Image: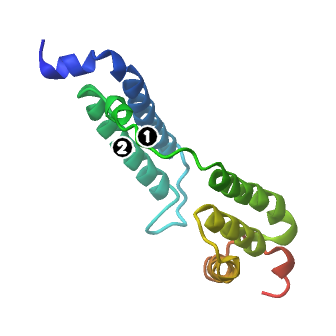
């Protein structure tokens, strides 16, 4: 039996092949769905299909790479050999999750800038930051910049909340 065929038939490579196939199919689904987006004559250069095609092509390329890796025996066996992984940091995971929940809970009420700033502070704490004041200032500057870029440069309202009338 050839080496590539032996890798393909390797018992532990089944889940790897399934994941690789799913990623490839997801990329192909993105490409197919991009073909049915209606094009309008308003777009001279980059139309509404560009980003979906780009994402579909990239996900398909990753899927092809994963399929090739799975056909060579997969990656799960190599990951099982690494047994020195640290234990799960539940505090960090909880802070990142709390940041996501806080953003969802606050975005309608306070708007993008404040909701995303709270999320930034919680995620920074989850990644080990011990300076919440600095994180608050950085988060406020970054999210305010993003809001202004979307609102003023692109004309896209991403939810001003309590800053709607001020900015």
Q: Which mark is residue 76?
A: none
Residue 124 point in image, percent of width and height: 62, 68
Q: Residues within 10 Å of mark 1 (few under 14, many from 20)?
A: many
* Spot occupied by residue 97 in the image (x, y as percentages of width and height): 69, 53
- Indicate whether 71 appears above or below 141: above
Q: Quadrant of residue 19?
A: top left
Residue closest to the eye, 102 or 78: 78
Residue 92 or 122: which is nearer the viewer?
Answer: 92
Which quarter of the rendered picture does the C terminus lie within?
Answer: bottom right
Which numbered disc flags the more N-terminal residue, 2 or 1?
A: 1
Give the residue at mark 2: 62
Element type at marker 2? helix
- Residue drawn at x 66%, y 76% is 143
> In this figure, which colouring scheme has been used for the structure?
rainbow
- For image coordinates 51% across by 66% down, the residue present is 43
Image coords of residue 53 (percent x, y): 43, 51
Q: Residue at x 12, y 17 (%)?
A: 2
Taking the image as shown, residue 48 lies to the left or right of residue 160, namely left
**Residue under numbered circle 1:** 27
């Amino acid at each position: 039996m050839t080496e590539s065929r032996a890798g393909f038939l390797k018992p532990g490579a089944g889940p790897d092949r399934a994941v690789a196939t799913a990623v490839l199919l997801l990329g192909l689904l993105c490409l197919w769905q991009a073909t049915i987006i209606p094009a309008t004559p308003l777009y001279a250069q980059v139309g509404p299909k560009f980003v979906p095609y780009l994402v579909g092509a990239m996900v398909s390329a990753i899927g092809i790479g994963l399929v090739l890796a799975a056909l060579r025996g997969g990656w799960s066996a190599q990951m099982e050999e690494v047994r020195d992984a640290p234990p799960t940091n539940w505090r960090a995971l909880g802070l990142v999750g709390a940041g996501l929940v806080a953003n969802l809970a606050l975005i309608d009420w306070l708007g993008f800038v404040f909701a995303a700033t709270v999320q930034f502070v919680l995620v920074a704490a989850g990644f080990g930051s011990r300076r919440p004041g600095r994180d608050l200032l950085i988060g406020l500057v970054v999210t305010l910049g993003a809001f202004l870029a979307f609102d003023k440069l692109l004309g896209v309202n991403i939810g001003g909340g309590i800053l709607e009338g001020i900015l």
